[in-house]
Amino acid sequence: MTTDQATLANYRDVRVTHTHLQWQINWAEQLIAGWATLSVRPQTASAAAAVDKVVLDTSFLDIQHVDVDGKQVKWEKAERIEAMGEALTVRLDEPMTDEFKITIKYSTTKNCTALGWLTKEQTKGGKHPYLYSQSQAIHARSLLPCQDTPSIKSTYSASVKSTLPVLLSALRISPPASDPLPTSGQEIEYTYDQPVPIPSYLIAIASGNLAYRAFPPVPGRKWTAGVWTEPEAMEEAYWEFSEDIGRYIATAEDLTTPYEWGVYDTLVLPPSFPYGGMENTCLTFVTPVLIAHDRSLTDVCAHEIAHSWTGNLIGCASWNHFWLNEGWTTYLERMILNDMHGPAERDLSYIIGRKQLRAALAEMPPKYQKLVIDYERYADPDDGFSTVPYDKGSNFLLHIERTVGGLDVFRPYIKAYIQKFAGNVVTTDEWRAHLYDFFSKAENGEALVKKLDEIKWDEWLHGSGSDLPVDIKYDETLAQQCYDLANRWKAASEKDEYSSFSPEDIKDMSASQKIVFLESLKSEKKPLPVSTLKALDKVYNLDASTNGEIRLRWYGLALPAGTEYAKSAAAWVIDQGRMKMCRTVYRLLYAVAPELARDTFKAHAAFYHPIARKMIAKDLKLE
Ligand SMILES: *[C@@H]1O[C@H](CO)[C@@H](O)[C@H](O)[C@H]1NC(C)=O
Ligand SMILES: [Zn+2]
């Protein structure tokens, strides 16, 4: 078993096996209050080593009462350790060897880092408030007392009272899943059940004026899929996702194993949601940035779907091994693209990811450039979050795929990996041991093991540096025309002469190709002159692009050149809660117009989710 440095819980002595939540959403006070009942199983084998205390993770919770099997017990909350929170020690009256139940009466507080509370003005409909959680990495402890480590998985059930529809990362029991949710404004009790054990960071809640629409069923498949959003956004959300999501799930099943979670719903959140997507079980959360009105950004949905296997079914044993979640999931996301749209699409995604990886490696300190991160005690895993685990990780798997002889050889291994570890957590060493075991048993096992031995394991897993340990080539079929157009622009920039360009140049390009084009124009050494930027914007209307990914690349080009587009970047970033967008643009803005960056952030800090707010404040040196 691995050690998780980011928990204060005594999870080696006892394990939570089931969590029951009884909550009430208090909209006026912006808090959740109620009870958490944890079924706890001692891990010690003998009565002599019976446990006499349970230490749980909490963060900014107001704990009011604790009992064990119905009897009140002593408890104490330790002093706060930053990022880790306050350890809650529950004293057992008598040492325990069998399973018991701890019930804790508590409420969240204003300081809760997991919950985003929106006023009605911050929603699309403007009539009702809205609430949503984001618990990864270690924010679940500010939502409930728990063993907040990915190494512990528990089933969970919940009953939540609210005056607005409630969604949880679980199966709805009541009102029955077949019924639409009432929005009468009366308080109603919603009950949910998650029968598959999950880590605490996948416990999720959303409440607000939410409506549902089912996607067309995929013949021969057992799960259902649909979309949740505010009614005002339903038409566009349904249009954006209804074609792709079912096909992605079916393709992912064919690559791996049948989908185990019964329901795959997608909740489109308000713009302050800090991530592209969060793979909460049964209910993926996504940013509204994905609504591009051309279905061009649904690859994020493929990513979240892939997490149903890598991340949610097989979890990383600690945040040190987070790359096993994200590297594998990015690898599978691109395999879904491969199987639906061909290898050129797959590789275009690798090409875009590779650029993001270079940028991340240039920014992150060496300790966070590694695939396996050796977090210091009490380090905040949010600080180590970057595209490194995603893109270094997926490139590593691609490298292994090619090393053993390509996809035909690798596909059976993908299934075998899922089958081997489904329901469990895994460390990098355990993953590698299984990889060797699998290929050693293949027909030409000895030769395959020799090939695996040639991999620079240490460099890949524990090395830092500004690029991958091995140069990896991609299929450039779809990228070449982007490079060609970028080269024409670079030549035109030299002469400051742009009359040969027209909107036709990019008319037939996919959004991904436009991204590759813009990124190819970027030079680390010398920003484009303002006259070139103005010409680019005039021809392609980039400063008004409604595609967030394109807009992000545009500011990546425009801001390093000076303050010409600083104001428009500042105006854009106030509605962008997704950290990929807002953190990047704030940082770029800070480099050219620090006052504008800080003033903009200070004026709109309340818009951002607590996680994003904290990270931007750090980026702008406000903390
Ligand atoms: C909220 O956080 C601040 C700063 O850490 C602290 O002083 C305050 O006591 C906290 N409030 C609650 C209710 O935990
Ligand atoms: Zn992911």
Image (cartoon, rainbow, N blue to C red):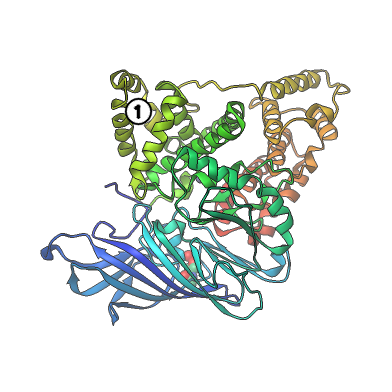
From the viewer's perspective, is residue 486 above or below residue 118? Answer: above
Q: Residue at x 74, y 46 (%)?
A: 293
The residue positioned farthest toward the front in the image shown: 220
The one of 23 and 551 positioned closer to us in this rendering: 23
Residue 475 or residue 544, whichever sits in front: 475
Q: Which residue is mark 1?
A: 458
Picture coordinates of residue 112, whole percent (x, y):
50, 65
| Residue occupying image coordinates x 32% and y 62% | 17
Position of residue 356 relative to residue 57, above or below, is: above
Residue at the outermost left position? 48
Q: Residue at x 40, y 70 (%)?
A: 20
Within 10 angstroms of label 1, few (less than 14), some, or many (20 or more) residues? few
Residue 234 in view here: yes
Residue 260, given in percent of the width and then of the height, sits at 44, 52
Q: Is residue 570 left or right of residue 432?
A: right
Q: Amino acid at mark 1?
A: Asp
Q: x%, y% of residue 2?
A: 29, 46
486 lies left or right of 612: right
- Image quadrant in which the C terminus is located: bottom right
In percent of width and height, residue 218 lies at: 58, 48
